[in-house]
Amino acid sequence: MPADEISYELPMRWADLDSLNHVNNVVYLDYAAEARARLVDDGLALDDGAVSSLTVMFLRPMMLSRDPVTVVSTLGEGELTQDICVVKDGERTDFARVVTGLAPRVDATPRPVDAEPMAVRLRRSDLDASGAVRPAKVFELFQEIRVLDVSTRLGWLTPGSFVVGTSRVGFRRPIPWREEPYRAVDWISRVGNASFEIRCEITDGTHVLADSTTTLVGFDLAAQSSRRFGDVERSRLLELVQE
């Protein structure tokens, strides 16, 4: 193992699983955050306020196992890369990669989108010690928004017929606690032959606080592998595209 790689092991929990018996997408960020906290304990000067983006690349579904989850962290120029894997009998299998961007945050104004805004209500448990929503919880908020939108606008899709391939969250401004809901809009920005892209923004009405871009990949649940979209399926997705 290269000298600049640091490995950290932690146990998997049954509660980590989703309805498909895969580790929930958000949980990979929990694994990464645990390992990142260990790096901070060991002297790495890093706090959530320094995080400008989180990108998660999902390589394959992770099932429940007694084997510990291993997080291999590598600190590079302006980013921390963490590979989520399981090492068994000397063989390493990677399931996801989490890349934490450490560049300065950049302001953005809300994009005009032809979509009904959704209310985003915070919970006290979403907050960190500074009173702002933790990065992993911002990622989770975007997942909740996406799931709700897909279940309403794309209810004709068969459950389990697609999975998240890559998801990136950009952090623009802190999201502090408030009683009034924040606003979110999302839209389909691209459709390919085997994947489509959903973009989303959370705003306070004036500024973009965070935004996300997520690629959803066609999935064959029985074969547990990716698939191409059918003609009708792709046509219906194309009708919803806003560039």
Image (cartoon, rainbow, N blue to C red):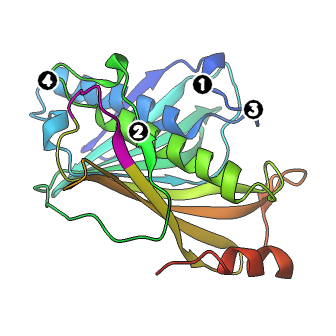
Q: Is residue 34 depicted above or below 154 in this figure?
A: above
- Lower sequence index among marks 4 and 1: 1
- In three-dimensional space, the C-alpha distance between marks 1 and 3, rounded to whole angstroms, equals 9 Å
Q: Residues within 10 Å of mark 2 (few under 14, many from 20)?
A: some
Tell me if 54 is positioned left or right of 158 in this view.
left
For badge 4, the amino acid type reads Ser
Of residues 37 and 89, the one drawn nearer to the viewer in this rendering: 37
Q: How many marks?
A: 4
Q: Residues within 10 Å of mark 3 (few under 14, many from 20)?
A: some
Q: Circles 3 and 4: CB distance less than 8 Å?
A: no
The residue tagged with tag 2: helix, strand or loop? strand
Q: Residues within 10 Å of mark 1 (few under 14, many from 20)?
A: some
Q: Quadrant of the N terminus?
A: top left
> Which residue matches tag 4?
130
Q: Examine the structure image and report whether residue 182 is included in the region drawn in magenta.
A: yes
Q: Nearer the viewer, mark 4 or mark 1?
A: 4
The residue tagged with tag 1: helix, strand or loop? helix
Q: Is residue 7 depicted above or below 108 in this figure?
A: above
- Lower sequence index among marks 2 and 3: 3
- Lower sequence index among marks 1 and 2: 1
Measuring from the top left, give residue 99's x and y in whole percent. Answer: 34, 51
For badge 3, the amino acid type reads Asn
Tell me if 237 is positioned left or right of 181 in this view.
right
